[in-house]
Structures are given as structure tokens and as C-alpha cells.
Amino acid sequence: MNETPTRVYAEIDLDAVRENVHALRERAPRAELMAVVKSNAYGHGALECARAAQEAGAAWLGTATPEEALALRAAGIRGRIMCWLWTPGGPWREAVEADVDVAVSGMWALDEVRAAARAAGRTARIQLKADTGLGRNGCQPADWAELVGAAVAAQAEGTVRVTGVWSHFACADEPGHPSIQLQLTAFRDMLAYAEKEGVDPEVRHIANSPATLTLPESHFDLVRCGIAVYGVSPAPELGTPAQLGLRPAMTLRASLALVKTVPAGHGVSYGHHYVTDAETNLALIPAGYADGIPRHASGRGPVLVGGTVRHVAGRVAMDQFVVDLGADTARVGDEAVIFGDAERGEPTAEDWAQAADTIAYEIVTRIGGRVPRVYLGG
């Protein structure tokens, strides 16, 4: 896009993505790094961020769905790509033919990928996922022997190659949580069993962004970094992005659509949950929950206007919300920064997360498709 949008847009600094990948690689110098670009790279743009991450040395890319992985391949992205969220009847053959590593958490998935490999006439690259305690996807320890045995047999027949064994933490963003060491022990045990049975993986991995930052013993051969790639702290308890050596890549900007003076006692937005207590100036920001601005942050979400941080006055609507400028003035077309980098004095995704009682991951990821992305540094 050559012209900057005038309503609302997400400015994505690809140099920040590259810098964050470099910083994360320094945290795990003996492991390769996977940049997770699922959900449109947490709202930042999957293709652009994938390229930037690879330029900065990310050896792997990770997606949730196979469709996300196949879209990267179709756009010309080379190198190792892994995807892990499968349902029966998924595009297994397409993934095999695209040389995508696919996660296998149970026998049904192994059966489907073997059939796809036969149909494609190629060996499928699979990674066995162990449920070490998260209780989501992954194979339970009680079923591990069956799955490993079947995978080794499939490898012997040439339909699959077991390229990885992996798992995922439940509480790595809570340093010292007892589940962390329990999961590490379970992972080592399940990995040792698989290797004893004949699995020789290229990569062993369990570390996500918080574990990459705080748990060196979890790094193994590969660390999977998602939110940290985009310069957002995985949890306030771990520190701010700046304290972690990261820089936010997304700045959400808007132009004021209206500025007007209203008298005391004037209701603002649906339900009149905000009523002015004196004559004041209101500014209209043309972005709402259809764009990803959380309605739960009504009355609390921070916005930088005219060098001062204001807060949402009243409810966030579908397409717009209001801030109260008080005695300050502004002009139509002036910039509002909804969130960006605290080092520049701007509200952050974490500030909005706290205002909406959620996590910063959701704030950046939920920015909608009708919000243009404007890329810098790439």
C-alpha cells in the first residue's frame, strides 16, 4: 500500500521482528528457532513476518492449521514449516506433497497421514506430540507406546519419517510453577522411550516464548517462539518487552473523525455509562470491536491523543469509540495511537489487555481483517 490509510491502520515494523528473532536466538544459542506465524502471525501478517523471521535466522516456521502452512508454501516460502492442528479429513496429502512437517497426536492421525503418503508416493515428515501435562493436544503417556510403535513401523515401511518429538508447556509463563518441572521430566521420559524404540528425531522441542526467555534447560534442539517474535511480553510477571530485550512490532493508529464540545451532563455512547461532569471536548475514534478493539475495555482502554493518554469514554461500539479530551483541543484528522511501544510513551497491548481482563496475545491477534497493515522495514 503506497498511501497511508486515514481511518485506522496497523503499522508493522519488520525490523522489530528481525531484531526480536535475533534477541531470542541469543537466549537459546544452542537451539534452532521456530518463528510461529499462526493466526496471520498473531495479527501482524503471516507472509511478511515469515520472510522477516527467516531473514533474521529462524530455521523453522510454525503454524496451527495446515491451511496456514500451505498458504506460506503457495506464496513461495521455503525451508522447514510445521503445522499441528489437524482434524479428520484434513489436507494431509497436500501437506505431504508440500514437504510440511505434520504433528501426530494419536493413531487416527497416523493412519490418515500414512494413507496420504501412499497416495502421494512420498514419505511424510511427522512429529509426534506428547501430552506431558497440558491436557490439550498430544498423546497421553498411557498411549505413547502404541503410537511410537506404530510410527516406527510406518517409518520402516517408508511411509513416514519421524522428524521430531515435542510437547507444550501449560504454565511456563509462571516461573517456578510446579507443573514446569513435572512436564520436563515427563517429556524427557517419553522422548527417551521413543528413542529407545528407534525414533531418531531431527528436533526435540518443548520451549515456547516464556520458556525460551526463562528456562534454558527446556531448549533442547529447537525453541518455538510466537508472541515474543512480535515484541510482546508473554506475561507481565516476566517483564516488559524492553526488559526482555524485545520491541513491539505493531502500532495501531487511527485518525480522529470528529471533535466537538458538549455540555455537562451529556451522555456518551450506548447506555450512557459515561456522562460528562462539565463542559468538555470529545474526540471520535473510528475503530471499534469490528476492528478488534475489545468491548470489554469500555471505559478503561488507553489512547494517546495530543501527547496525553486518555481513556475510552463509555462503551466501545462496533465501528467507533469516544475519548474525553477535557479542556484540551484537537483537530479532525489528528492521530490517535491506540497501542504501540511504551518506550515512545504510547499505551501498549498489555495495557489494553489489563483494561479488558485478558492477555496481550489476544489484543494483537484480534485486530480485524478490515484494518489495513502498513509495513515498515521490508
Image (cartoon, rainbow, N blue to C red):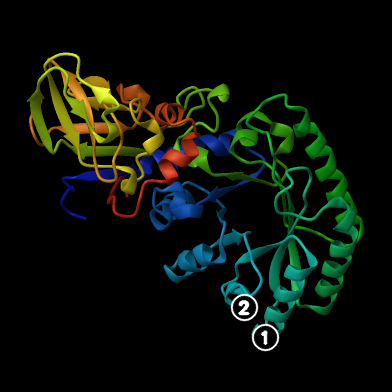
**For the residue labelled by badge 2, is the local secondary structure a helix, a strand or a loop?**
helix
User: Quarter-wise, where is residue 319 in the image?
Assistant: top left
- The residue to which callout 2 is attached is 93
Q: Pick whichever, 271 or 207, lies toward us.
A: 271
| Separation of residues labelled 2 and 1 (CA atoms) | 7 Å
| Pick the front one: 57 or 126 | 126
How many residues crowd around disc 1 within 10 Å: few (fewer than 14), some, or many (20 or more)? Answer: few
Residue type at tag 2: Arg
Percent position of residue 49, x then y: 42, 51
* Image coordinates for residue 8, horizontal then vertical, percent: 23, 44
Please tell me how crowded label 2 is: few (under 14), some (14-19), or many (20+) other residues with Cα within 10 Å.
many
Q: Position of residue 167 (x, y in %)?
A: 73, 48
Quadrant of the snapshot with the N terminus: bottom left
With 332 as the anchor, is 344 left or right in this view?
A: right
Instruction: Name the residue located 37 percent from the left edge and 46 percent from the top edge.
Output: 367
Residue 95 position (above or below residue 318): below
Helix, strand or loop for disc 1: helix
